Each structure stands twice: as structure tokens, then as C-alpha cells.
Image: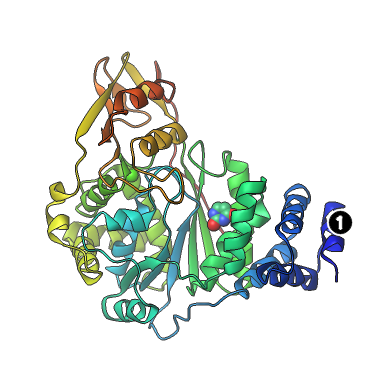
């Protein structure tokens, strides 16, 4: 078999066999196929697409390039959650302890962020002492004992994706539905869960800018999961404005604590209840989403969800005095308000521009090697649909740098105020096989 024949077959619109796909993945990972052939192949897929069996074959071949986590020694149905990403995405920090408080085992591998803010791991590390690099045995024991652990992805999980994603990133083939779907699903399947709940975001702050592409990506991932025997569901959500109020690392830890104490933003709560209901049902802890939702609300109101968060932080070495007193978390030296230039309704809060502003203030990484300022970020005081009076603060910038005022000036294009409330919906739809 020759790689050049596989490239030209795809370039000309052919369908690749499982054998051809396996040949490419195995030889690319072992270094026999050079980057220039792999990038030509990825570009051919970008233009020609792949059908469901090719996409499933690619996913299986990528999974087989590394090791899989075996969660079978943990009792119960393990349900994982994944989001295609957004701005101020505090979801996992609330959802993981919340579903764990209902006895759903949470054995989660999370990521670091490159972009707007840190990822879930970075946010958790803003609590002094918290460890994310645990040996797999310790991770498994924590899940068995306490029902929850969150760690970084181990190096030997799907090496093919690591190599291919880095190549796509610098050669213009990230935005391909079969490549994104196989990249995400290979990692989720290798991480060992029995069932997978996906959040596919759409809007300015998301990978998929329009709803139709988000739905196609979600349907593709649901079919891959089903083909390999993992129950998979997807929720299409809006990411045209940031999620919740806080965008940052320590700022989002505080927001997660507020939400677990039932004093957080309503959109974050609604999202967590929607995703949580699907997870609780998939884990067999409730018969239908309505009763699952009832159980989740009860856990928040009774304080059980919050105490699960607290014990989870303590179990991984975090100093719980920061959970009990979030005002002890790192605070930025400068807080700069963005005031409403006129009165009216908030009709737009461009998530991508606000996310970029948070990064410029120090909350995210511009490069893999950049360090994160846990205190930096943005707190919104208004969301789309709210009324605002001229001179009222719409958001506050938190930074330790001296660029706060320059960053604030860039936000004029991101904030839209109109005379009528714009229609706006967080949960677009739920997709199941
Ligand atoms: N996220 C991933 O993990 N993979 C992609 O290809 C795109 C987004
Ligand atoms: Ca948030």
C-alpha cells in the first residue's frame, strides 16, 4: 500500500477502506509517513469529507494507536461529558460534583486551555494545593472511594490524535466535521466511559459558528458512539455570549461555588441541569429527565452537591479554606468597569471578542508556554436580554497588567445595545440515536 494512492483516492472523492485508514494512522504515528503526506491527506478529507463508516474506522484506528483506560473495576455505569468549548465555560466544575452527589461515578480526564482562559485543570489549580497529575491507580481509587476524580489526560491516550491535531492546527484542516468528530470521540472512548453526553456549542464563541454545522457534528459523533457500543447523546447549546458571568480561572472557581450554593447565574444552572439530567438517566439513577432534574435540584438545595465539591477538592490536595472563603482566591490588582454608553437592552455580547479580551488580561495562554494569571479575567453584570441604563457597569475587567484600559476600549465592538430585547435561547436541541 502506498500513502500517495490513499491521498489521491480521497482527493478524487473516493471512499477509503478500513485497511487504508489503518495503514495511514499506524504509519503516521510510527513516523513512516511524513507530515507533508499527512497534511495533504487531511486537506483532501477537508474538501471531500468522509462517510460514516470511514469516520468510525478512523476513530477506531486512532483509539488503537494508544492505550485505553479500563474503568470496569469501578461499579456502576460510568458517564463522561465533553463540550466542544466556549467562553467562560464553568460547566464541568459544577456538573461533575453535582452528578457525583447522586452516585454517578465521575472518572474524568480534562484538558488545559490554549486560548481564552485556562481549561478545567487550570481553573482547579487556582485552588492552592490541588493536584491534577495523579497516577492512574490513585485516580481509580479516588473514584471508587469518593465517586469523583478529575485529572489530566495521560500521555499514552490516542497518540494519533495528538500528532494529527497538532498538524491540522498549523496546516488549515481543523474545521472538518469527520476529523473533529473522530478526534473528540477517540479520546472520549479511550477514556473508558460507558456513556457519553456531548455539549456541542454554536455561535461566535464556538468552533461551529452556525447551528446547522453544530447539528451535523453532533449527529456524526452520536453515530460514532453508537457504532462502538457507547450510548451517546448531544445537546446543542448557544455560545454567542459567554456562559454565566465569570470568564477566568479563580473567577470561575468562585462562580462554580456560587452555583453549587444555588446563588449562581441562571444560564449556567440551566445548562448543568440539562446535561446532568441526561447523565443521571444514562447512569440509571433516574427513569426520565424530569425526575433526574428534580434529584439534581434537590442536591443543590440541600447542600449535598456543594459538600461533594468540597470533599473532591480536599481529596486531590486542595486547600478547602479557599472553597469556604472564595474571597481568599487570587484577586487582581486592577478592576476596571466597562460602562454602558447608552440605555436600552443588551442585544449582543460577542463571546469571541470578550474571550480574547480575558486572554489579553492574563487569563489564558497565547502560546503553549505562556503562564496563566489565575486572578485575571472578566465578570459580566449583564447578559443578552437585560436592560441597562447609560453609565451602568456592563462588565468588569480584572487584571494585574497595565493594559486594562486599552483592552476595555477594544470591547466597544463586542457589546451591542438596542431598543428592543433580542430573542435568545440557551438550549437549542437534544440529539440521540
Ligand atoms: N477538539 C478536538 O479535540 N479535536 C478537534 O479536532 C477539534 C476540537
Ligand atoms: Ca462562566
Of 47 and 368, the residue lying toward us: 368
Q: Quadrant of the C terminus?
A: bottom right
Of 401 and 278, the residue lying toward us: 401
424 relative position to 16: left or right: left
Query: Which residue in the protein does label 1 denote?
Result: 8
The residue at the point 70 percent across, 72 percent down is 26
The residue at the point 46 percent across, 46 percent down is 367
The kind of secondary structure element at disc 1 is helix
Q: Is residue 51 visible?
A: yes
**How far across and how far down the image is residue 271, in percent?**
38, 50
Q: Quadrant of residue 375?
A: top left
380 relative position to 117: left or right: left
Q: In this picture, is 309 found above or below 235?
A: below
Q: Quadrant of the N terminus?
A: bottom right
Q: Quadrant of residue 247?
A: top left
**How far across and how far down the image is residue 6, in percent?**
83, 62
Q: In this picture, is 329 found above or below 358?
A: below
Of 53 and 234, the residue lying toward us: 53
Amino acid at each position: 500500500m502506498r500513502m500517495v494512492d490513499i491521498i489521491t483516492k480521497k482527493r478524487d472523492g473516493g471512499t477509503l477502506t478500513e485497511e487504508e485508514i489503518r495503514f495511514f494512522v499506524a504509519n503516521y504515528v510510527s513516523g513512516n509517513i511524513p507530515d507533508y503526506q499527512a497534511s495533504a491527506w487531511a486537506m483532501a478529507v477537508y474538501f471531500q469529507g468522509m462517510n460514516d463508516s470511514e469516520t468510525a474506522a478512523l476513530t477506531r484506528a486512532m483509539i488503537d494507536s494508544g492505550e485505553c483506560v479500563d474503568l470496569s473495576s469501578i461499579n456502576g455505569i460510568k458517564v463522561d461529558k465533553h463540550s466542544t468549548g466556549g467562553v467562560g465555560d464553568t460547566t464541568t466544575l459544577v456538573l461533575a460534583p453535582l452528578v457525583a452527589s447522586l452516585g454517578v461515578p465521575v472518572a474524568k480526564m480534562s484538558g488545559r486551555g490554549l486560548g481564552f482562559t485556562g481549561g478545567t485543570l487550570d481553573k482547579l489549580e487556582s485552588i492552592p494545593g490541588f493536584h491534577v497529575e495523579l497516577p492512574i491507580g490513585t485516580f481509580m481509587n479516588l473514584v471508587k472511594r469518593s465517586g469523583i476524580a478529575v485529572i489530566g489526560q495521560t500521555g499514552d491516550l490516542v497518540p494519533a490524535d495528538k500528532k494529527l491535531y497538532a498538524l491540522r492546527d498549523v496546516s488549515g484542516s481543523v474545521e472538518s466535521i469527520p476529523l473533529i468528530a473522530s478526534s473528540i470521540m477517540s479520546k472520549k472512548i479511550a477514556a473508558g466511559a460507558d456513556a457519553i453526553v456531548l455539549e456541542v456549542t454554536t455561535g461566535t464563541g464556538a468552533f461551529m459558528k452556525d447551528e446547522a454545522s453544530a447539528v451535523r457534528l453532533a449527529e456524526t459523533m452520536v453515530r460514532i458512539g453508537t457504532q462502538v457500543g457507547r450510548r451517546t447523546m448531544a445537546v446543542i447549546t448557544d455560545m454567542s455570549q459567554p456562559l454565566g458571568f465569570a470568564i477566568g480561572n479563580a473567577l470561575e472557581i468562585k462562580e462554580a461555588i456560587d452555583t453549587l450554593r444555588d446563588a449562581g447565574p441562571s444560564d449556567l444552572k440551566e445548562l448543568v441541569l440539562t446535561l446532568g439530567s441526561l447523565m443521571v438517566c444514562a447512569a440509571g439513577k433516574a427513569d426520565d429527565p424530569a425526575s433526574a432534574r428534580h434529584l439534581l435540584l434537590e442536591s443543590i438545595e440541600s447542600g449535598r452537591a456543594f459538600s461533594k465539591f468540597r470533599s473532591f477538592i480536599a481529596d486531590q490536595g486542595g486547600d478547602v479554606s479557599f472553597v469556604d472563603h472564595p474571597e481568599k482566591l487570587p484577586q487582581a490588582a486592577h478592576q476596571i468597569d466597562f460602562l454602558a454608553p447608552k440605555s436600552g437592552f443588551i442585544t449582543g455580547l460577542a463571546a469571541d471578542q470578550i474571550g480574547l479580551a480575558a486572554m489579553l488580561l492574563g487569563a489564558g495562554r497565547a502560546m503553549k508556554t505562556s503562564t496563566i494569571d489565575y486572578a485575571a479575567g472578566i465578570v459580566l453584570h449583564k447578559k443578552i436580554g437585560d436592560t441597562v441604563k447609560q453609565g451602568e457597569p456592563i462588565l468588569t475587567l480584572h487584571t494585574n497588567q497595565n493594559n486594562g484600559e486599552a483592552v476595555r476600549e477594544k470591547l466597544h465592538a463586542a457589546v451591542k445595545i438596542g431598543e428592543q430585547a433580542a430573542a435568545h435561547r440557551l438550549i437549542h436541541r437534544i440529539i440521540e440515536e
